[in-house]
Structures are given as structure tokens and as C-alpha cells.
Amino acid sequence: KAGVTQTPRYLIKTRGQQVTLSCSPISGHRSVSWYQQTPGQGLQFLFEYFSETQRNKGNFPGRFSGRQFSNSRSEMNVSTLELGDSALYLCASSVGGTTYEQYFGPGTRLTVT
Amino acid sequence: AQKVTQAQTEISVVEKEDVTLDCVYETRDTTYYLFWYKQPPSGELVFLIRRNSFDEQNEISGRYSWNFQKSTSSFNFTITASQVVDSAVYFCALTTSGTYKYIFGTGTRLKVLA
């Protein structure tokens, strides 16, 4: 069974631009979560989707948004990029929700210049 | 509030030594779930174990073992006879029903020297 895939793997953007990251969960997994990982803040929860519904959102500004499609694939969008948005963005999927183990993708490394 | 504390920022051991990574958690919920993940230099988090709050039985998987103690709110991870391939950052995480998110600790970087 294929693992969680994320595209693109690396991205360089300029301040003020926007970016869309994509995540394809493991087949059969309906829950997708997103995390931001930085050296200073560690792993910070962004949001969780289940069957196209956002069930929880972390403490991030409104510039960070996401969605999930009917096939469980998910995208996250960051508008008006800031230097501080440079991070590794990780997507994770689980079969039923976050009380189950999550399986993580390789991440998208975003660099904002 | 929920919180996970991994007080050990970095640990270095020599190959074949045993090492224990500490995890202390806080939650008011009686039903919760604890996890350990490994993040090797490649960056992808790898699931190691899941434990629910009603199951305090310790678990052993090869060289890995986990000690869950509700009395001290701890879920510690021991690697026996460490190997260089165990070098990674290890994260402990907590979730409860209905919160739909993990709370991660800050991670412990383990360096196993040959």
C-alpha cells in the first residue's frame, strides 16, 4: 500500500506570494492532518480534516487555510507569505481519526525569501 | 490543558548501550492516547507505538520497550543495545477523543556513536 505522498517536496517562494501544498493520504484513510515543523517551535498542529470537514484548527493566522476533497486528498494554502512561514509542512493520515496512529508523509520544505 | 514534556533535548550514547527517552504528559481527560514517533535524518516521521490510557501493560518490540505509568503520567521509551541506525529525533505525542489533534513534545535527539 502506498504511503502518504506530498507535493511538491521543495518550494522556494518570495514574501507576499501564496502557495498551495498537496497531500494524498494512504488509501482508505479519511482523516488528514497538517503540521508545521520548525527548529524553534517544533511540531505545531495546523488543522485536521475528516470526510471534507475541518474538525479542528490550530493557532495559526487566517492566512493558513486548507481543504479536503471527496477522495480524501487535501490541500493547504498559505497566502501572503512571510519569512517566518519557512518550515517543513507535514501531512499525516489515519484511518478513522487522531485517536488512531497517524502516518506521515515526507513533508514539503517551504523556503520564503 | 494538554501538554507533553520531553525534558531531554539531546542524548549521546555509544553503540550497544541502553538508553531511555523520557516523556511526561498532562491531561485532565481519563481517555487519552499516547504515541511515539521516530524522525530519522531523512525527515519522515515513523510511527512506533500507540497506547491508550486504559492499557498500562508495558510493551516490548525487539530492542524497543515502552513503560507506561499513569501514576507518574509518564510514557518512557527504552532502546536496548542501541545501534547507529537508531540515531534520530524521537517524539512523544498525546491526543484525546474529540480534540482531533496531536500534542507533540519537543523531541529528543538521540545520537548513537559507533
Image (spheres, grey):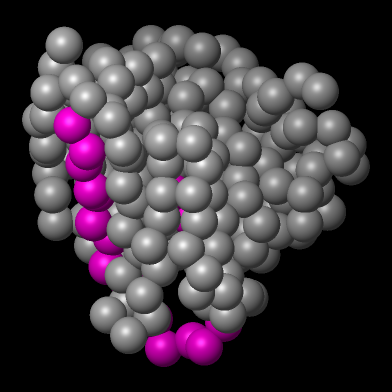
**The C terminus of chain A appears in which quarter of the rendering?**
top left
Question: B97 above or below A26?
Answer: below
Magenta part of the chain: B17-36
Q: Is residue B28 magenta?
A: yes
Q: Position of residue B110 (x, y in %)?
A: 21, 32
User: In this orientation, which residue lies closer to the viewer: A8 or A5?
Assistant: A5
User: Does residue A91 appear left or right of residue A10 in this picture?
Assistant: right
Q: Quadrant of the N terminus of chain A?
A: top right
Q: Residue at x 83, y 54 (%)?
A: A51
Q: Splitting the image into 4 quarters, where does residue B82 fall?
A: top left
Front residue of A44/B78: it is B78
- Give the camera-side residue of B43 and A8: B43
Q: Quadrant of residue A40?
A: top left
Residue name at image x 40 percent, y 15 percent: B42
Residue at the spot x=70%, y=24% of the render?
A3
**Residue B92 pos. (x, y %):** 37, 53
B47 is higher (above) or lower (below) than B1: above
Looking at the picture, how far across and down is residue A76, in whole percent? Answer: 59, 36
Q: Does B112 lie within the magenta span?
A: no
Vertical arrangement, residue A107 with respect to residue A12, above or below: below
How far from the left and from the top, in percent, is residue B78?
Answer: 31, 47
Is B6 situated left or right of B102 in this image?
left
